[in-house]
Amino acid sequence: MSILTRLGLVIALTMFNYAAGAEEYTATTTSDPNIPAEELKLLVKPLLLEEVEVEAQAWIQLLQNKAAEISQAEITIKQKNKETKAAEKVADGLEEAAEAPTNTDAIEEIAEVAEEAGEIEVEIDSTNDLEESAEAAQLVAEKAAVDKTNILDTKNKLQEELVVLSIQVNTVLKDIDSKGGDTESLKKYVAVVTKEEIDLKDQQALKSSIERWLSSDNGAVGWSKKIVTFAIIILIFWIISGIVGKIFDRIIKRQRRMSMLLRNFLSNLVRRITIFVGILIGLPILGIETGLVLTAIGAAGFIIAFALQDSLSNFANGIMILLYRPFDVGNFVETGGISGKVVSLNLVSVSISTPDNKLIIVPNNKVWNDVIINATSVKERRVDMIFGIGYEDDMAKAQAILEDIVAKHESILEDPEPVIKVHELADSSVNYVCRPWVKTADYWDVYWDVTRQVKEEFDKQGVSIPYPQQDVHMHQVNPEASTD
């Protein structure tokens, strides 16, 4: 019967009830206990709350009947266990008594056990009778074991049917919840009834339950399919996230004013949102309600926010850094007591690579609340150098040497014009400032080149570079004068 046929039947019966002036609604969805949950969900959707509650009671009744059958099967299994153990005990005892028939006390005890086991009549007149009775007891034990196996098979089938019914019941109960009904007690009942009780001491029953679960569509087989389907969905959305991320990268690259940090952040955010959507789509396959997950995340938000105050502060400061763009990827910055090149930024920290190739993670809170010195955000920089000459040296010659070196260096800019002036008269030297302008990328090359060339030219042309020194004067004292 198709879903449309079933849905039409439910609607027709409902209209008939009303047309006939029926005082009570009659359940209709239980006509097929094996109806798929998706179809049952559609059938109960048009019904009123009172009508769905009637449907729920009908499904609960089916569930209760099935649970009663399972309970009866479990009771029978326990009886068969007792019967098997008693019969085996009788058989073992009779075999021992047959070997020593003079032990009448032992035989009487065995007879009592036999009577308790039932269906076993023990004759203790002769050794032959004992042997025959032992064989009879063994047959009883074997028959009880076979009966138990059959009952276990029946119980497993009933358990499978119970699981299917529990799915149907929960489907109807969810519809009641969505329409404002109260199903808390019914849900607890379903949870208790569907919980399978396994006697761990009964190895045969335990093995049978495990085998049933491994081969069941509602057990290992079903979960394997669900997990594989979920993994495929995540893989598909992971691929989609890469495609969407590349498309988004191409779009935001046209935004010239947007920093590289912000581009990377938005690109990663788009990718993660895409994967998150895939997770939300895949969760229902595992039986996890998306709404419950989102509700749980929202409910936990306050607790998480309280517990992660520092992290949220870093998050807020990370947003400020992205918006105000004090630096970008590849800039050489000094902040939070750390100097180095910016590698990456996330909502918690900034990754900085130091000149000696150490990766340092600086919290955004420390970065934003400290002075930020960005050495590479501008196109041009001034190189500040100080050179000292001796007081006896020719100042004009030193000036000419410095001007000539600066003028000949190909990386030094003509505009702005370099500044070379006498700066101060120090304790042991006359200091010149040399301040040429260069492209930011050429800063250190110019600094090192000019420093080396100044030393070489000063040495060639006899201009000294003073260094700190001390003069020690020793005075000899006349020993005779000191004694007077």
Image (tube, rainbow, N blue to C red):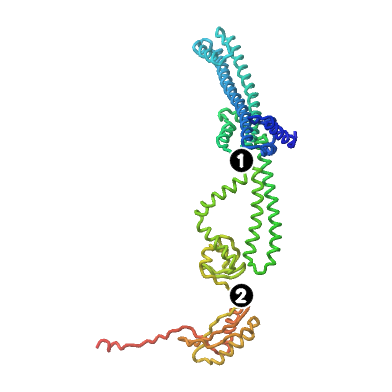
Rendered view: 187 above or below 269: above
Depth check: give the residue in front, 371 or 187: 187
**Residue at horizontal 55%, vertical 7%?**
125
Quadrant location of the N terminus in the rendered image: top right
Q: Dots 1 and 2: beta carbons under 8 Å?
A: no
**Residue at horizontal 53%, vertical 92%?**
394
- Which is nearer the N-term, disc 1 or disc 2? 1
Marks 1 and 2, how far apart in space?
A: 63 Å
Give the label on residue 378, or none: 2
Position of residue 477 in the picture relative to residue 356 (left or right): left
Q: Residue furthest top?
A: 125
Q: In this figure, which residue is indicated by the disc labeled 1?
A: 179
Depth check: give the residue in front, 192 or 442: 192
Answer with the quarter of the image where residue 447 lies. bottom right
Position of residue 416 in the picture relative to residue 7 (left or right): left
Tag 1: Cα neighbours inside 10 Å, few (<14), some, or many (≥20)?
A: some
Depth check: give the residue in front, 441 or 67: 67
Q: Which amino acid lies under the numbered mark 1 shown in the image of this protein?
A: Lys
Q: Position of residue 414 (x, y in %)?
A: 64, 84
Depth check: give the residue in front, 222 or 359: 222
Q: Position of residue 349 (x, y in %)?
A: 56, 61
Q: Which amino acid lies under the numbered mark 2 shown in the image of this protein?
A: Val
Q: Residue furthest left?
A: 484
